Amino acid sequence: MKRSRHIWKAFALCLSLLAAAMGWISVKALRSHQAEVEARREAALEQDVRLALYRMDNALTALVTRESAWPHFAYGAFLPVDRALGAMPGDLGGPERLAVSPLVRAASPDVLVHFQFEPDGRLTSPRVPGAQQRGLLVPEHLSAEEVARAEARLEELAAIVDRDRLVAMLPSPTAEPSALVLVPGFEPAPQLSADSRRGMREAPSRRRNFEEYSFRSQAVQQGVSNSLLVQNAGVNWMANADVPLTDVGGVVMTPLWIAGRLILARRVSLGGRQYVQGCLLDWPAIESRLLASIDDLLPAADLRPVASAPDAGESGMLAALPVRLIPGERRGASSISSETGGFAASIGFSLLVAWACVVLAAGAVALLVHGVIRLSERRAAFVSAVTHELRTPLTTFHMYTEMLDEGMVPDEARAHYLKTLRCEASRLSHLVENVLAYARLERGRADGRVETLRLDRLLEPIEARLANHARRDDMELIVEADEAAFSATVRANPSAVEQILLNLVDNAGKYAAGASDKRIHLAARQVDGQVALRVRDHGPGISAPASRHLFRSFTKSAHEAAHSAPGIGLGLALSRRLARDMGARLELDRTVDGGACFVLTLPMASGATAP
């Protein structure tokens, strides 16, 4: 028992280690799957965001390019054709030939109003002419409603924009197109700090975002640079300019957020005088159009203004405007979820199968260990019982033969001594026969010879031996059979039937030895096309608890063998195995009171002629 506990402890420890390993593998597999799902989602989202940014920047490049392409002298209601470059809009000091500014006629859905801050701080607009110009524009070129609407927007702009603050936010004017700056703090190839470079090495995604942003920024700036050629062409068109071209600078528009409104503005330096020109953009309309252009990619996207320059490598930034794209939930997330869901189902099914295999394997090993331990215990009990069973007859043999050899037995008692020795020898022989027969069955070498013969011919050779076994235990064998049963033809193994009946008679003689009725009944009856051989005694019978393991082998321990009738608990198990091998049944009749009754049921031969 102590050894079996150690075996079970070792098995439990191994099973715990296996379960821990399987649990660790399962957790790692699920985490790996979750990481793969997140990576797929991030990759798909990043691809859609990249495409959405390209779409919006391409759309905005046209807007920024168009507004940057307007020449500086277009911000008045009229163009002074004869003194174009030497006069700013509004400087009509003489009888010049006038042309209506294109900004008066231009109607862009994205621009609410064009404006210009004069050097003296006045805020003007091409679509809000002065008193002397109003009659020339209204109503031929502008309606009164358009002028009123432009005046209202100009007043709104004057309330939120301070000229000096605006000038401080804009880059210094220059006539060199290569020095374009679209967003404050951003350059085509910005110089990164050591911390930024280290962050990009640690996060490759930031490097990709930075490189992509730089590429889009250069594309936008290239488009605006091309607009300078248009401006220069417009300036050169003014043939009689009296101000050198190098004195005109600041032709690039810079997008800025002021009080929640988006404007494009630039500083213009002309003859030592500083002007600020720009336009107020209709951001809600622009935002709506941009989001509509990416609805197929990011239907839940949002655009948020960025008042300050973002960190290098920050994702989602537009290159044309200081705006960040918030992707929201992807439309294709359901397809990715279904794909990853199928993958998750396969992973879960695989883990479930693996756990089921582990549980089945553990159960199989547990059953194997249980069987080995039980077999070991049964064999130990068998050895103990056999040892005790052999000790008594061997002691009797040794003592009686010594007394007979030394002449210590009187002549009148010699016959009793010899009879005792004969009974003990018969008991030992029966014990050895049972052990050998059981060993043959265990090795698969049982005698499977089944014959077809009459019941009387089957019982006749073994009846005398059964009677001798009964007399050895001072019992009387009574054979009871009707004529139909004796003449019935059965299929049986004669040697197996003899072994079974000998075991039953031997058990009856041992356990019913103390009964007042010394008879052992062997009855044969024909029942339902079968022949039943019943062996009954008048002893104490078999209790219900004992009957549950009655036909198990090696169930009698050494202690039980010492305090019960002689035997090792093998006869009934052997008898049932022999009965099954020849197609018969051996059972205990629980309906009988006053003794034990065992029934051996033999099949009758159909259509066969008995020898």
Image (cartoon, grey):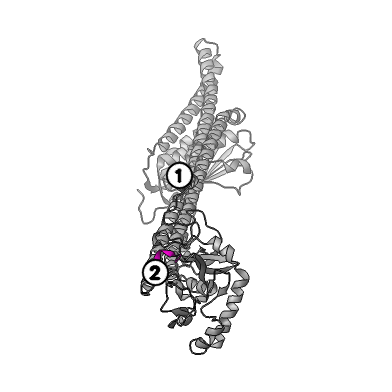
Q: Residue at x 57, y 47 (%)?
A: 589
Amino acid type indicated by mark 1: Ala
Checking the image for residue 579, the label placed there is: 1
Outermost residue, bottom side: 139
* The N terminus, quarter of image: top right
Q: Is residue 93 above or below residue 580?
A: below
Query: Callout 1: helix, strand or loop?
Result: helix
Are discs 2 and 1 less than 8 Å apart at CB? no
Q: Is residue 52 above or below residue 607?
A: below
Q: Nearer the viewer, residue 64 or 497?
A: 64
Q: Residue at x 56, y 41 (%)?
A: 549
Query: Callout 2: helix, strand or loop?
Result: helix
**Residue picked out by circle 2:** 227
Query: Is any part of residue 483 visible from this angle?
Result: no
Q: What segment is highlighted magenta in the picture?
A: 242-251
Give percent across and percent down for residue 537.
58, 40
Q: Nearer the viewer, residue 515 or 32?
A: 32
Give percent across and percent down for residue 27.
51, 47
**In this rendering, would 230 be left or right of 573?**
left
Q: Nearer the viewer, residue 440 or 11?
A: 11
Separation of disc 2 and disc 1 at Cα?
109 Å
Amino acid type indicated by mark 2: Ser
Question: Is residue 244 part of the magenta span, yes or no?
Answer: yes
Q: Say few, some or many: other residues with alpha carbon within 10 Å of mark 2 (under 14 / 14 to 19 / 20 or more).
A: many
